[in-house]
Amino acid sequence: MAQKTVANQSFFICYGKVEPSLIKGYKLVILESAHYNQYEICLFKKNNDKVVAYLSTTEANEYASIFKNVKGTTLGKNSNWNSFYLDLAAKQTIEALHLEINNIKGKGFNGVFLDNLDNTSKWGVLKDYKKPLIDFIKSIKVKHKNFYVVQNAGLFIAKELKQSTDAILMESVYTNYNFKTKEYSFREVKDTKTLLNNIKKVSNSVTKPILLLEYTNTYKMKNDLHKRLKTLKFPFFIANIELQSIPNFFKPQDK
């Protein structure tokens, strides 16, 4: 059974195509720009507070609209997602990202949702590109003053982006997904505690909202997650891992 589309949570995220008229009452809606025209974006904005478009900051697959402009400057391939790492030190890459932002703005979006920041962490493949990433994100607000900028994770640069992003989204604080077995599970308690401590530390140092995104496909796990999440002060959304549709949850007998 599909989750209700009138908001009982404060934000909605989907990278697949959804009917605009079904998504109502959210403070924030995160979408894949390529699926929608200006008229459809107007419908989303009419029924929700802010509507932002997905933008990968450090990777692009060959089907992404920016790929043709960065093809000659990529830094290798992420075989897990069949995407290519972007050279953020290359002028060509930054120009391609800004061109994509201009296209997003031209469609009427209120802002952008920046993904794959963690590739530049000290554990990431692009750990030497932390500064170019920060400089790029800061430049968004310079070029688009009133754009609403949401960062996906990237707590390691929260201090540097204090004035450059408007919200932070964190995924899978409570949940895990095994891509080989296609099974959802809860994280070890100690791992969740560590993540929550890091999130709370950042939350105390910034004034922007921190949003939590969790994954499951069963009603039982969804209800368990809801009980845990509502004890926190952070807005949350519970989805299926694919993020391709309005979330669906099943009962054991539905399998």
Image (cartoon, rainbow, N blue to C red):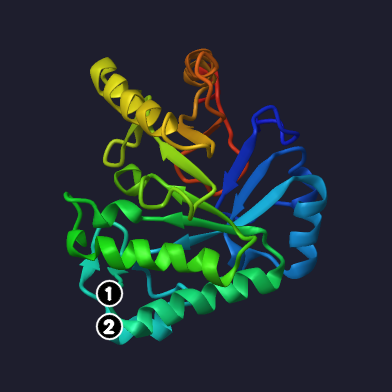
Q: Is residue 142 above or below residue 211?
A: below
Q: Is residue 4 left or right of residue 33?
A: right
Q: Is residue 82 left or right of residue 11?
A: left
| Disc ID at residue 162 | none
Residue 224 visible in the picture: yes
Q: Amino acid at mark 2?
A: Thr
Q: Which mark is first along the chain, 2 or 1? A: 2
To which residue does mark 1 refer? 87
Write the residue at 46% across / 56% down.
114
| Disc ID at residue 73 | 2
Write the residue at 36% across / 52% down.
160
Q: Is residue 181 left or right of residue 11?
A: left
Write the residue at 18% across / 64% down.
128
Q: Quadrant of residue 134?
A: bottom left
Q: Is residue 201 above or below residue 106?
A: above
Q: Amino acid at mark 1?
A: Asp
Give the crowd class for mark 1: few <14, some 14-19, many >=20 residues within 10 Å. Answer: many
* Pick the front one: 241 or 51: 51
- List x then y, in percent, for residue 173: 37, 29
- List x then y, in percent, for residue 199: 38, 30
Write the residue at 32% across / 24% down.
197
Q: Quadrant of residue 135?
A: bottom left
What separation in Å lies between label 1 and label 2 (alpha carbons)? 6 Å
Q: Is residue 172 above or below residue 130?
A: above
* Pick the front one: 122 or 226: 122
- List x then y, in percent, for residue 175: 37, 27
* Pick the front one: 154 or 202: 202
* Label 1: element kind: loop
Q: Quadrant of residue 12?
A: top right
Give the crowd class for mark 2: few <14, some 14-19, many >=20 residues within 10 Å. Answer: some
* Label 2: element kind: helix
